[in-house]
Image (tube, grey):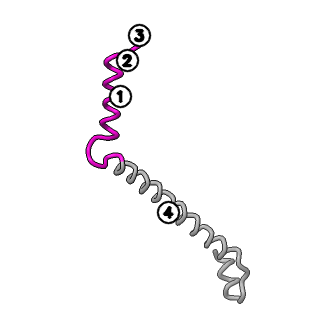
């Protein structure tokens, strides 16, 4: 009861091998995760900046009669 069973040791050794086995596996996994997060943030930034630009263009007051007509069409 006081010690861990053999299956617990297998799981612990598997986790240790996954984390520290090979050269730079953990750092490459974390690097891939960081790249994914950065790509996600860039995607959100691109989407929101285009929406802001569209909203600014639509909310701007027309300076000429041609601009007023163009805003009415859209």
Q: Are marks 2 and 1 in contact (CB under 8 Å)?
A: yes
Q: What is the spatial separation of the Cα atoms under label 1 and label 3, in whole angstroms?
A: 18 Å
* Residue 73's disc number: none
Residue 68 location, quadrant: bottom right
Rate crowding at label 3 as few (under 14), some (14 to 19) or many (20 or more) other CA atoms within 10 Å.
few
Q: Are marks 3 and 2 in contact (CB under 8 Å)?
A: no
As for residue 2 lying within the magenta part, the answer is yes
Rate crowding at label 2 as few (under 14), some (14 to 19) or many (20 or more) other CA atoms within 10 Å.
few
Residue 10 location, quadrant: top left
From the top left corner, tell me how far across and down residue 26 is, in percent: 35, 46
Q: Quadrant of the N terminus?
A: top left
Q: What is the spatial separation of the Cα atoms under label 4 and label 1, in whole angstroms?
A: 37 Å
Q: Earlier in the sequence, mark 3 or mark 4?
A: 3
Examine the rendered structure and indicate whether residue 8 appears above or below residue 2.
below
- Nearest to the observer: residue 60 or residue 17: 17
* Residue 1's disc number: 3
Q: Which residue is mark 2?
A: 4
Q: Earlier in the sequence, mark 2 or mark 1?
A: 2
Q: Which residue is mark 1?
A: 12
Tag 3's secondary structure?
loop
Q: Quadrant of the C terminus?
A: bottom right
Boundaries of the magenta span? 1-26
Q: Earlier in the sequence, mark 2 or mark 4?
A: 2
């Amino acid at each position: 009861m006081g010690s861990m069973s053999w299956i617990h040791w297998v799981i612990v050794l598997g986790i240790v091998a996954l984390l520290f086995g090979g050269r730079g596996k953990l750092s490459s996994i974390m690097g891939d995760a960081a790249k994914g997060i950065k790509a996600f943030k860039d995607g959100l930034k691109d989407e929101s900046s285009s929406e802001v630009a569209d909203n600014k263009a639509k909310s701007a007051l027309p300076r000429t009669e041609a601009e007023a007509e163009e805003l009415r069409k859209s």
